Image (tube, rainbow, N blue to C red):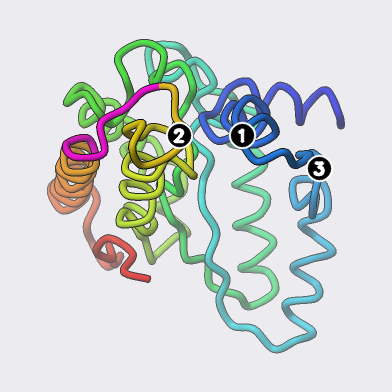
Amino acid sequence: MKELHKKMEEEQLFGTFSQRDIQKRFRTKVTGIAGDFYHRYKEDVKLMKEMGLDSFRFSISWSRILPRESITGGVNHAGIKFYNNLINELLANGIKPFVTIFHWDLPQALQDEYGGFLNPKIVEDFKDFADLCFETFGDRVKHWTTVNEPNLSTWQGYAYGVFAPGRCSDYVGNCSEGNSATEPYIVGHHLLLCHAAAVQLYRQKFQVSYIVYRVCKY
């Protein structure tokens, strides 16, 4: 389990940020495994049913199903199996899955290759990721959210530097690189383009009776 957790940390942006930046900049320890939902999802779904929940919102980890950043790098079938099992378990217990495609966990490889959401190349990779999610899980998932809280990931990650990837101007915070005056707007623009690309793809290729929600507005 520790090996799996370490591998996941190395493959996604927030894992890198938590190990590299949070411990150094905020002088706090990152403990690693928390709720361990990956291994205990059946217990958690059982608790949801006992509580009377009729829906459950969760996100699909980009790096868990595409560990080599994009479709061309190959699909992680173990990751696909986990989400299939989770969705089936929810439905078997009368709980509707509400799926978020992107909840900030950008594959580290895309950040390293071209700067992640600072680069317009991210739009096509996001579209491919969304396509895989719709194709693989869309027969059972009826409710989709494209991007979780883009306002937080842009400003906290690129204006103040307290979220991954920890970028900001030196007059704003303790960041090694970044531009708080421009980067949040560039990232926000690309996130909106990603949202638009995923919605257009869904409507043209998949839409029958499913629902695609707009960008999560929390």
Q: Which mark is residue 131?
A: none
Q: Which mark is residue 25?
A: 1
* Side of 204 where 6 appears, left or right: right
Q: Which residue is mark 3?
A: 33
Q: Is residue 159 above or below residue 88?
A: above
Given residues 205 and 62, the one toward you in this image is 62
The three-letter code of the residue at mark 2 reads Gly
Given residues 136 and 199, the one toward you in this image is 199
Residue 178 sits inside the magenta stretch: yes
Q: Residue at x 27, y 60 (%)?
A: 215
Q: Residues within 10 Å of mark 1 (few under 14, many from 20)?
A: few
Q: Secondary structure at mark 3?
A: loop
Rounded to the nearest whole Å, what is the CA distance between mark 3 and mark 2?
A: 22 Å
Residue 98 spot, x, y in % from top left: 47, 66
Residue 72 sits inside the magenta stretch: no
Q: Which mark is residue 166?
A: 2
The three-letter code of the residue at mark 1 reads Arg
Q: Residue at x 39, y 45 (%)?
A: 160
Q: Residue at x 16, y 26 (%)?
A: 120
